[in-house]
Image (cartoon, coloured by chain):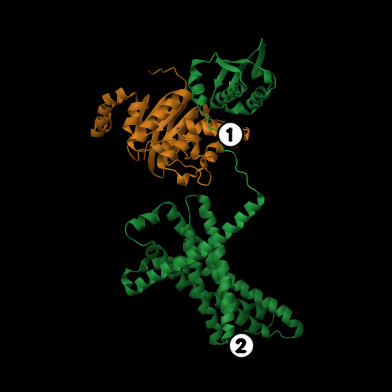
Amino acid sequence: MNDDNILRSRREGDRLVLTALGPWTAVHAHNLEPVIEAQATSSQPVRAVDIDLSQVKPLDTFGAWLIERLARAFSARGAETRILGLPEDYRGIVDEVHGANLKPAPPPVKTSRILVALDAIGSALVNATNGGVLILRMLGAVSKALGRAILHPTKFRWTAMVVHMERVGWNAVPIMLLVTFLIGCILAQQGIFHFRKFGADIFVIDMVGILVLREVGVLIVSVMVAGRSGSAYTAELGSMKMREEIDALRTMGFDPTEVLILPRIVALVVSVPILTFLGSMSALYGGGLVAWLYGGIDPDVFLSRLRESISMETFLVGVIKAPVMAFIIGIVASVQGLEVKGSAESLGAHTTSSVVISIFLVIVLDGFFAIFFASIGI
Amino acid sequence: MLQPAREVVLSARDVVVAFGEKVILDHLNLDVYRGEVLGFVGGSGAGKSVLMRTIIGLLPKRQGKIEVFGVDLDAASEEELVAVEQRWGILFQQGALFSSLNVLQNVQFPIREYLNVSERLMDEIAVAKLEMVGLSPDVQEKYPSELSGGMIKRVALARALALDPELVFLDEPTSGLDPIGAGEFDELIRTLQRTLGLTVYMVTHDLDSLHAICDRIAVLAGGKVILEGPMSAMLASEHPWLKAYFRGKRARMAVTAEG
């Protein structure tokens, strides 16, 4: 669009007459603004300005505001500014924007890069500490609720616990079996492939048996549970927090830890060892299958070698870790859920943190268990 | 006050909406004229929100034709639909502000997406709109979760008006506001409607709003518009539901209060 079709200017002595033409609306704003800016910043000296609006049609907030901006620019340069020929229909909107944007925008705060970096480090540290404190606090609250539930077993929400056991335990069985089966297959295949080079195929059975029962079974199951159920807990508690359901519970005299969190955590603590057992069996089955089909080790040989290489202790070392892992996943998920603030973004961020932190803690804990069992000689 | 020759901006003809076996809107007809404030009333569950959501394209209809600004929404191409959507603004009952954007970004959202204007103009227009709906520019940095119910409605109205629409849909704009806040909001809608030359389609239960700002009222019952006209027609009607609604105890209080 030609500039002259938007705003025509002519001089009458030291008076500048600007005539606005055509549609001054939102959809034309990108054409209007440069024209306005050119006029507002032109260096020609002016004493008085008339802005003629009689040929504008239609005019909306965008157009009216741009006229106002132009008028203010001229006034600021000391020119006497008048608006002429304003159609009656548009008087309201022009008056409305006349009072708008009078407060100057707050100046952008200047910060140095070093300060920003230091600030980021500082707040990350504070957040990490707060995160630790929150986990400890949740541990305390859950222990208290657990103690009360042990003293008054009828008060414990058994129904809720069973529902959650179905969701995090029973419904998770197929995927856990499948994943651990595949892991067992892969372990056995890799073992056979490399051990065969020095004729030690048979030791694959020792490796698969010990690794699966002590470490891999519980780790895979815990990581899967953190991703599958920990995230669900956080999202559920978080959206309850957003819709003030948790506040409602509290004001009715219920403890959210007792009503919402304890049944969820107990369900996890009961389900994860079962899932770990099932997962380990499935992984051993997968390992045995690959040893037979790929490594040519007979199932009979596999079973008798397995019986020699593992003991009850091997199995117990693995499965004893499971409830601890479940407990920590539940605690982290609950802490993150209750930390959700009003926005959808916050819910997403806390669900992510929940999964990341619980998987991290599961692996760290597993390391501590390894050190512990090594030092007591198992 | 009523001029039948006025331009029709929204027309619904023979609209049927049903969920399964349950027919909500049964061959409904409705016209909205340019520059009027139409109040839409009906019992809870009568289908007021269903009609609004059908018009703005959130619900499918079984039958019928809806034209907005003379464009048949079923026959329109993608571009025509987007053009129509830029000419209407919608205020949802709960505000429906984007929770991860602050107030200023919420109001700027449609401007940023549809108009190719400078950052400076976007800021200025958004602040002007916030001021128009009676908010101080100090709130622009806040997030929706930090706002009160009345402020959420105002910000949502500013967002609905961001592109200077010709037609505004308001879904129960005064619900959840205290009587003073509701009165101010009515006043605001009236002022903005006059200044900006808006056409307003307002679903409401608030008898005070109906008295104070509606030029015309349409009543939905049994899936049809059973009566449309000014307040006087409502008061004169002998239909039992209308009698109970407009001449019941609460209604008389609203009329007396008005004076």
Q: Secondary structure at mark 1?
A: helix
Compared with residue A300, is residue A97 higher up or lower down, i.e. above or below? above
Q: Which residue is mark 1?
A: B122
User: In which quarter of the view is residue B43 placed?
Assistant: top left
Q: Do marks 1 and 2 both belong to one polypeptide chain? A: no
In screen coordinates, is A198 left or right of A56?
A: right
Above or below A279: residue B105: above
Place of residue B27 in the rendered image (x, y in percent of width and height, measured from the top left): 40, 32
Horizontal arrangement in the rendering, residue B212 relative to residue A85 (left or right): left
Examine the rendered structure and indicate whether residue A210 appears above or below residue A338: below
Q: Colour of chain B?
A: orange
Q: Which residue is farthest front?
A: A78
Q: Amino acid at mark 2?
A: Ser
In front of the other: B102 or B41: B102
Q: Which chain is green?
A: A
Dot 2: element = helix
- Answer yes or no: is residue B250 visible: yes
Asked if residue B123 lies left or right of residue A170, the reply is right
The residue indicated by pointer 2 is: A309
Q: Can you give x and y, in whole percent of width and height, for residue B167 in the image?
A: 48, 28
Instruction: Answer with the quarter of the image where residue B193 lies.
Output: top left
Query: Residue lying furthest left in this view?
Result: B249
Q: Residue at x 54, y 82 (%)?
A: A317
Which quadrant of the rendered structure holds the C terminus of chain A?
bottom right
Which residue lies at the image location 46% right of the left edge and 27% below the top edge?
B10
Comparing A170 with A135, the one in front is: A135
Instruction: Give the percent coordinates (x, y) of residue A129.
Output: 53, 63
What is the spatial separation of the Cα atoms under label 1 and label 2, in whole angstroms? Answer: 73 Å
| Amino acid type for the residue under numbered disc 1 | Met
